[in-house]
Amino acid sequence: MDAMFCFQCEQAAHGSGCTKIGVCGKQPEVAALQDLLVYGLKGLAFWAHQARLKGARTQAVNLFTVEGLFATVTNVDFDPCELETLIRRCAVLLRQAQELFEKTNSGPYPGPLPAAAKNGRLPPGREALVAAGGRHGVKDSRLAPDINSARELLVYGCKGLAAYADHAHILGYDDDCIYAFIHKALAATLEADLALEALVELALECGRVNIDCMGMLNRGHMETYGSPEPTLVDLGSRAGKAILVSGHDLKMLEELLKQTAGKGINIYTHGEMLPAHGYPGLKKYPHLAGNYGGAWQDQAKEFAQFPGAIIFNTNCIQRPAEIYHQRLFTWGLVRWPGVSHVSGWDFSAVIAKALECPALPEAPGQKILTGCGHNAVLGLAEPIVAAVRKGEIRHLFLVGGCDGAKPGRNYFTEFAEQAPKDTLILTLACGKYRFNKRDFGQIGDIPRLLDLGQCNDAYSAIRIARELAAAMNCEINQLPLSLVLSWYEQKAVVILLSLLHLGIRNIRLGPSLPAFLTPAVLNLLVDSYALTPTGNAQEDLQQILG
């Protein structure tokens, strides 16, 4: 028997699934505990959904559901101790949600219960939990493969949605409709007779809810830190002690900036934190010094060369090398066994470690542009539309998404480099590190490469597409706009579902298609939306541009 099975990310071994150890570094014990946690969350969702139908809900269940799902996203929580804690907390909340339903219903549930809804009593000991997780993996032999595939598509969409809901909650923004949908969707995966079409429909509804969630997160960012402004970011270093921040969470960065003010410590961003430099409320701190390194998969090499303290605030962590293990910290839901974890908002341990470490030299570097959110780009809408109508801009490409280590991602570099000089390139997420240090020049006063921000700023791309379509009096699919997306984990899955919900066609997706999609489910998406795998960059460009 396989030690584990996981196929939720793009790097699934052999294009089919990891069976011995995760390509991400996930051990079989962790894989089993994550599977059991998802199974428990489905049971919790069943009772939360039933209670909500009776008009009852609790915020504790809402928040735990999104945090539990986010913990199982690729490259987030690798700590079996923490996962065991989450599983046992889930069982307690499940019993409380059941009691809440029975109280509002004035009696027990009237029908047969799914097995997951009875998961409120757990055996002692982690070994027993690991064994239970092995019985509730992602491949259910009792289901037809296509049904299992559609269920996993829905679950992974919910994981991505939960990640964005968690980001928003940290900023103080919540919407019960998001929690309600996640509970409804997870509970639906327990229905034995739910048809393929109904599951796919729920997955597309997940995309719709995610647009609302990303809109709420976008509002939270802008109301808290201001609208992003086009900003040049230094890739070099300043003389002085330093802390490197990797992840996605802007509030954690803000709190660290506050606590390091006047201490002679410079703060650098890494990976998806790069767009933080575009927000007025963050770039006002003079010790937000620049961006160090690139995308998440290069962290082992880059962190070894960075002499200061390092902290992760969401996902994208890899097994830390010994050379920087002792100066690495985690915060929020991200965990790695043996790595110091910061709970709450006190970063004194990180600051103390930074002051112990060697300083960086004064070494100014190349500057790259970020902060081109939808307000900034839509400020250029009139000249962009005018340039399109005059033939000065032939086409717009959105080339972005997740980066990764698997071969085939040079396609996105080649695509951007080979795009004709009369085309604009919009980009977002860490996939931009494949080409964002190159000089693409300008079309008139418009930079050819516009960095929209993080993966959650896909909302900006949607806003831009809608506004341009309105300005040109056409549908989004009639715009001279093509989406060329790279994916890696479940946040990318839910963004794809959002785009499909909007009816956007002819999306190119790569470097490989999801292993969790069976041919029948994939063909359904291909037939409905003309979803296309990436191929040869030059040939794809020729086909798009005709």
Image: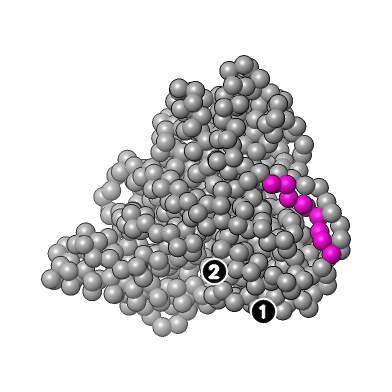
In the image, taking residue 97 as reference, residue 469 lies left or right, namely: right
The residue pinned by badge 1 equals 349
x and y percentages locating residue 337 in the rendered image:
61, 74
Q: Residue furthest left?
A: 106
Query: Which residue is located at x 34 percent, y 67 percent?
Result: 59
Q: Residue furthest right?
A: 362
Q: Residues within 10 Å of mark 2 (few under 14, many from 20)?
A: many
x and y percentages locating residue 424 in the rendered image:
65, 30
Residue 281 visible in the picture: yes
Alpha carbon separation for disc pair 1 and 2: 15 Å
Q: Which residues are magenta?
A: 231-239
Query: Which residue is located at x 49 percent, y 64 percent?
Result: 170
Q: Earlier in the sequence, mark 1 or mark 2?
A: 2
Q: Amino acid at mark 2?
A: Gly
539 vs 178: above or below: above
Which numbered dot is residue 544? none
Q: Quadrant of residue 326?
A: bottom right
Q: Amino acid at mark 1?
A: Ala
Q: Are marks 1 and 2 in contact (CB under 8 Å)?
A: no
x and y percentages locating residue 308 in the rendered image:
77, 69
Q: Dot 2 lies on which element? A: loop
Front-most of residues 37 and 421: 421
Which numbered dot is residue 332? 2
Q: Dot 1 lies on which element? A: helix
Residue 116 visible in the picture: no
